Amino acid sequence: MDTGIYAVVRHPQYTGGIYAIFLTTFLWYPHWLFGV
């Protein structure tokens, strides 16, 4: 099962991709900060 922690450990590039998507979303929708 490539899920959870094991998936991250085996496929570190996925972590980078997820982080990139999160960062892009954060930059595109900064107004979310005011909602938190």
Image: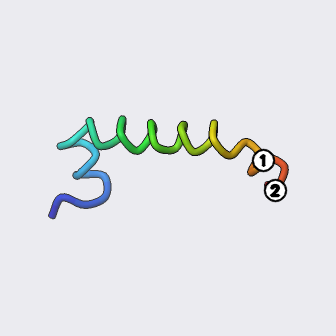
Say whether residue 25 is left or right of residue 5: right
Q: Residue at 36%, 40% (x, y): give it.
A: 17
Q: How far, Cα to Cα, is label 1 from label 2?
A: 7 Å
Which disc is residue 10 wearing?
none
- Dot 1: within a 10 Å radius of its alpha carbon, few (fewer than 14), some, or many (20 or more) residues? few
Q: Secondary structure at mark 1?
A: loop
Question: Where does residue 13 sit, x and y in percent of width and height?
Answer: 26, 36
Question: Where does residue 35 sit, x and y in percent of width and height?
Answer: 81, 56
Task: Give the vertical position of 29 relative to 1 (above or below).
Answer: above
Say whether residue 21 is left or right of residue 25: left
Which disc is residue 31 wearing?
1
Q: Residue at 68%, 46% (x, y): give it.
A: 29
Question: Where does residue 26 sit, x and y in percent of width and height?
Answer: 62, 41
Question: Where does residue 4 sit, x and y in percent of width and height?
Answer: 31, 58
Q: Amino acid at mark 1?
A: His
Disc 1 or disc 2, which is closer to the eye?
1
Say whether residue 30 is left or right of residue 17: right
Quadrant of the snapshot with the N terminus: bottom left
Q: Amino acid at mark 2?
A: Gly
> Label 2, on which residue?
35
Q: Residue furthest bottom?
A: 1
Q: Secondary structure at mark 2?
A: helix
